[in-house]
Amino acid sequence: MENRVNLDAAYGPSEDIVAREIEGEIVIVPLVAGIGDMEDELYTLNETGRDIWKRLDGRTPLREVVRELADEYEAPDKVLEEDVVGLLGELLERRMIARAEG
Amino acid sequence: MTARTYATRIPAGRARIWKAGRPALTMLDIELTERCSNDCVHCSVNLPEAAPASRREMTAARIGKILEEAAGLGCLSVRFTGGEPLIREDFEDIYLKAKRLGLKVRLFTNATRLTPRLAGLLGRVPPLERVEVSFYGMSRRSYEAVTRRAGSFDAARRGLRLLLENGVPFVLKGALLPANRDELDEFDSWAAAVDGTGNPPGLAMLFDLRSRRDLGKNPLIRSLRVGPEDYLATCAHRDERHLGELMRFTVRFAGVHGAQLFTCQSGRGRGAVDAYGRYQYCLALRHPETVFELAEGSLREAVTGFLPRLQSMVSADPAYLERCGRCFLKALCQQCPAKSWAEHGTLDTPVDYLCGVAHTQARAMGLLAEGERAWAVGDWQVRVARLSALIEDTLNSPGQGV
């Protein structure tokens, strides 16, 4: 799997996890073995991660995600881009998201 | 937006992962069947595998709908129990449904019906909770004296091997019975090593009577229970810290609950569904006044409407109010509506057996003198404060430990 984040590509939740929103928290539940380091782990996202995650629909390129976030937050594009690439890198490494085909 | 760590790993055992509020339902027990491949001498639930009850059991589709409702209420963990859940031919479908909804699964099993296919599935699609395996003896003779099923010892050992081969985390549990009593030390050492926890397994000793109140087996179950002194001595033998932990627990939770019937944590954000689709406070409590037919209402109604009504129930029974209602050992005692139901068919009759165990423990901690009754002790707060001071003093003494 390509682990480098491509800002021109779209990403969506992987089929290896189930993502749930419970009481405002995004909870990522591994569906198959090998997602976590141990047998009994779930993952939650911080506030930044949550806002980015909700935009990972498998259709919207990451550059567009950064633009949408820029409209919402008063933060430099470069900082937002670093956040998106940072989160996506973590999620790709853990097989929690997948790059959309095409 | 400058954070640099985005995904936080949460140990699945952590009860609380959300920062604001709490879901209406956090954990749900589902009894997939009351039928079992074994016929254990001490069991409070089991029916024969071929029992006609199977025709009334919830279908996989019905269970799937309940799981969907549970997930919609924020439930994160479901426990599949029985009877023996794995005797259901559709277990795999039910399990995968729960997993696809993002639920962690706690599976209670005797492991005799594990197949290579199912163990492989549990390895590939992990339950995210250790499978809990009940195991009843170190030899075929002792094991099958408990299960009363020829071949069950070999089948259970085969099941454990399959879990190990497929890397499925599990934890063992036992029951102290006449047939395996002489093997206890061996069992503790073996179990701690084989399941990889390094801890002695949970051990049932104070067996519940039949939860459906089919009373014919109750004399046998009663005869298998250990006495209060034996119970305490066995706990202390298995764990030298037992009495100290009991003291700390008592200091923390001692108190009088008056007429309030439901004082345990089982119902708080939790619930149970029996094999036929009835919501219960817990799986042991089947009193008709405390069950909710899910065929006639939603799980949400059960959790948000019916459950709070149960939790507000109070006793009007004079014996309960005189004894349990005034007893400062209520948290220590296992008496609860479910135990009263199994023992007496009521919600609030004191259970002498459990009362005896709690009083024996209190005497061992120096809280009661011989012949004293906890509900008649006026200065219980002074006594608990004295126990608390004793724990502090002991902790502050070099080389000592309570």
Image (tube, coloured by chain):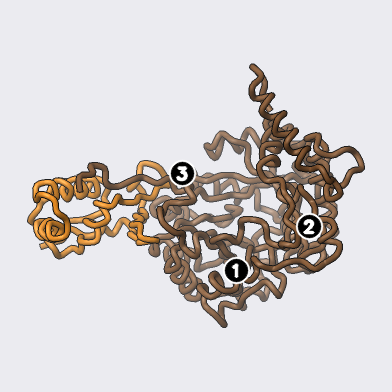
Q: Secondary structure at mark 1?
A: helix
Q: Which one is earlier in the sequence, the residue at label 2 or at label 3?
A: 3
In the image, which lettered chain appears orange?
A
Residue nearer the viewer, B167 or B171: B171
Mark 2: few/some/many CA within 10 Å (<14, 14-19, 20+): many
**Marks 1 and 2 on same chain:** yes
Instruction: Report which quarter residue B319 is drawn in.
Output: bottom right
- The residue tagged with tag 2: helix, strand or loop? helix
Question: Which residue has dot 1 on it?
Answer: B308
The disc labelled 2 sits on which kind of residue? Answer: Gly
Q: Nearer the viewer, mark 2 or mark 3?
A: 2
Q: Residue at x 66, y 74 (%)?
A: B53
Residue B194 as seen in the image, left or right of residue B209: left
Res. B165 mark: 3
- Give the chain letter at badge 2: B
Q: Position of residue B47 (x, y in %)?
A: 70, 66
Q: CA distance from mark 1 to mark 2?
A: 20 Å
Same-subunit check for callouts 1 and 3: yes
Residue B325: give its label.
Answer: 2
For this orientation, the residue located farthest to the bottom is B296
- Which residue: 70% across, 56% down? B149
- Same subunit, labels 2 and 3: the answer reads yes
Q: Nearer the viewer, residue A20 or B214?
A: A20
* Quarter of the rendering occupied by the C terminus of chain B: top right
Q: Residue at x 67, y 21 (%)?
A: B400
